[in-house]
Amino acid sequence: VQLQASGGGLVHPGGSLRLSCAASGRTYNINSMDWYRQAPGKQRELVATITSGGNTDYADSVKGRFTISRENAWNTVYLQMNSLKPEDTAVYYCHARAVLNVEGAYRDHWGEGTLVTVSS
């Protein structure tokens, strides 16, 4: 599975951005996809998850502001980010977990990050 993230940029506080993650390759193995972010000097953190069943989950810090969605199965996953705050500034990474067999073995795939800067 190959992942290509895009959509980052500079936005003012209160503004919006939509990140996209295009998946290619053996996408039929994907069980879930997520967006992570890593701010300068901080650990990478999970922001939002969407499962094969369409269930979603969010970090408390982004609930009510961010929405994860997908189209055409796993071809593209989006992260709509509204009411952005300076503390949302980070490199955002797309992640996919692919299940390899019925025993539950899996493989994680990462895309290159896209930088989001929230500043006035």
Image: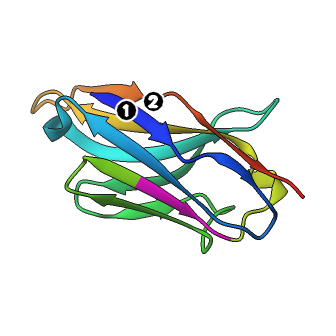
Dot 1 alpha-carbon crowd within 10 angstroms: few under 14, some 14 to 19, many 20 or more = many
What is the total number of numbered labels drawn onto the structure image?
2
Q: Which residue is mark 2?
A: 111
Asked where in the image residue 93 lies, by quadrant, the reply is top right
Q: Which residue is mark 1?
A: 3
Left or right: residue 3 compared with residue 82? left
Q: Residue at x 51, y 27 (%)?
A: 112
User: Is 85 one of the magenta-colored residues?
Assistant: no
Left or right: residue 13 compared with residue 98? right
Magenta stretch prevailing secondary structure:
strand
Q: Residue at x 56, y 42 (%)?
A: 36
User: Is 80 one of the magenta-colored residues?
Assistant: yes
Q: Position of residue 16 (x, y in %)?
A: 65, 66
Name above or below for residue 80 compared with residue 44: below
Q: What is the quadrant of the N terminus in the image?
A: top left
Q: Residue at x 72, y 68 (%)?
A: 15
Name above or below for residue 63 compared with residue 7: below
Give the residues drawn in magenta, as a range. Answer: 78-82
Asked where in the image residue 100 lies, by quadrant, the reply is top left
Residue type at mark 2: give it: Gly
Q: Position of residue 119 (x, y in %)?
A: 86, 54
Left or right: residue 21 compared with residue 7? left
Dots 1, 2 in contact, CB < 8 A? yes
Left or right: residue 62 compared with residue 58? right
